[in-house]
Amino acid sequence: HPSISAMFVKNVVKSLRNRFQQWNIMSDLDEAIERHRAALFRRPPGHSDRSSSLNKLAIGLRERFQQWGMMSDLDEAIELHRTALLLYPPGHSDRSSSLNNLAASLRNRFQQRGMMSDLDEAIELHRAALLLHPPGHSDRSMSLNNFAISLQDRFQQRGMMSDLDEAIELHRAALLLRPSGHSLQSNSLNNLALSLKDRFQKQGVQSDLEEAFSVYFQLSCLSHAVSRTHLNAAKSWAASTDIFNHPSALLAYKIALKSLDQQVALLSSSSHHFNVIRGAVSSLATDAFACSVCHGALTTAVELVEQDRAVFWTQLARFNTSLNELSVSGMVLAEEFKRLSVLLRNTFDQSEDQSPQIRQLTMQWDEVVSRICLLPDISRFLLPPLFSGLQKAAGDGPVIIINAGQRSCDTLIIHSAGDPVHVPLDITQAEFGSSDYQLTLVGILRKLWNDVIDPIVQALKESQVRPGSRIWWCSTAEFTLLPLHAAGPYEKGRDNFSDIYISSSTPTLATLVRARQQVCRDTSSQHFVAIGQGNPVEGKELKCVTPELAVIARHVTPVISFTSLRMATQQSRVHLMHLTVINGSILPAMECRIGRSRLSLPSPCVTGP
């Protein structure tokens, strides 16, 4: 039956679009577009559903343009939207959405080709759509926002203050329609603040800048703010504090990292959105660290960089760990939190932030999180870690956080007691990535020693850390790619770093703390893995690797379960990984990199992981 067939196609296309939005599989979007095209063919001019088919095909083509950037897709989408608009005459209930769709596509084309006629037309379409959304209409805030953004675009091109002034008033009106609790409030706050900053930079009126940061400050007053737009707004606030040297910088970074925490808590690691967020905030923690150090807030620097790195190293594991430690009376809340998180995750993948379902789920999620935080054994749930807890990672030796930020590069040495020790580094973030330093291996290690490691060694000695002690590296950004443990002057009669201290590394301080706690609870589940990389894909065999593995095996086998793995790569070193298996999950406790000339294996019974 035709109606049954049409319903079947509609459901298939909906499923394909949902899967594309969650997993970003382009073949799903391509198939959805072809099915929309086939449906349009079956609905010739005069068919009652032709306008709907035109609109759906145009939306699919615009989505594909946003993925691949093919202008032919966008041009076709615009023509389809124009044709659909002709089928929605004045008075038609769908005319406003058709106006908005055409305007959005024209703005996209303006951004690609810079044709002012496209932007001018988009603005007039948005103005017409707003007239169809009078006060009280559910879509009025969206229409106000879209109209204002297009006016901002035109101001950026032509510099007409009337456009910017009108955009600011439209953003003010949209914000009034998005009160506390609205999932797009943070979006309106950000847009208004950006417009006010633009006017300050154009006219220099101090009140505009003050109002902009007053608007940003409202982001700190939102509840748990489970919204995609909240993270972007907080990032914008943080970036603005750097530009204008505003005193709210630390608060802005704290809010941004808190929002990041909540976003990732709702996403599975296999989700397309997870990877998008990870890419979007790649420098957030390192910049927060540098900002904190600049303000002399050293313990805050540790807390912020740990919060961000823990998000992507352990993702939901730390939330689940905290929930599993709840008392019996709190287990009902734990299950409710997990249930709502899954619902929100699925809804985020399939809906826009402003959907009524997301608003309702967000309110429920906020309430459950607030109730969990009232429990004594988990009062810091979804809150950043405190330095007092992180400092336990230095119980068996100092942990060295080495950070590369856009503002500066710095090192903090964490000891078992006292404040962190700051070691400023006279080097820029991009310097080691510069082609000027792609020299010989020894040249790189000497450069690393002179600019980074030697100042750290001097600070360790001043802190009475004896030679031969064990230290843990916790690196960020570009420093994660560098062989810090192997740095040295490489001159006769002078010690390299591996001759002075024993190196281990940890992705986060909390990982090291948890590993030791787990070892204390259950020593029977520990395993030690040595990975020998002695057969490069290209080049000669590294003959010392196999003997090193044998030496390690002799030392470790009597103490703990031992596994040796040989891998073919282009790197010439042996990895040692001390693993703790807890409830079927492998928790890395340490990684030691052992050079050819030295083997140091402290007893697990003495130093822990």
Image (cartoon, rainbow, N blue to C red):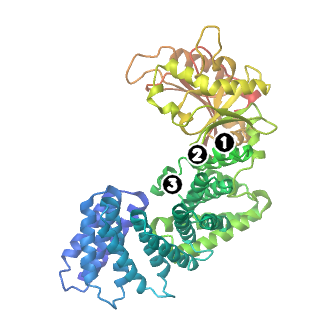
Residue 303: percent from left, percent from top: 70, 47
How far apart in space, not on screen, are marks 3 and 2 (Cα)? 14 Å
Q: Residues within 10 Å of mark 1 (few under 14, many from 20)?
A: many
Left or right of 427 in this view: 541: left
* Residue shown at the point (28%, 61%) measured from the top left: 30
Quarter location, residue 143: bottom left
* Residue shown at the point (63%, 72%) measured from the top left: 364
Comparing 279 with 337, the one in front is 279
Quarter location, residue 360: bottom right
Q: Amino acid at mark 2?
A: Trp
Q: Residues within 10 Å of mark 3 (few under 14, many from 20)?
A: some
Question: Which residue was labeled with disc 2?
Answer: 313
Q: Amino acid at mark 3?
A: Ile
- Residue 277 is labelled as 3
Asked whether the viewer can see residue 220, the reply is yes
3 vs 1, front mark? 3
N-term-proximal mark, 3 vs 1 = 3
Left or right of 183 in this view: 504: right
Q: Residues within 10 Å of mark 2 (few under 14, many from 20)?
A: few
Residue 227: percent from left, percent from top: 55, 66
Name the quadrant of the C terminus: top right
Question: Which residue was labeled with disc 1?
Answer: 511
How far apart in space, not on screen, are marks 3 and 1 (Cα)? 22 Å
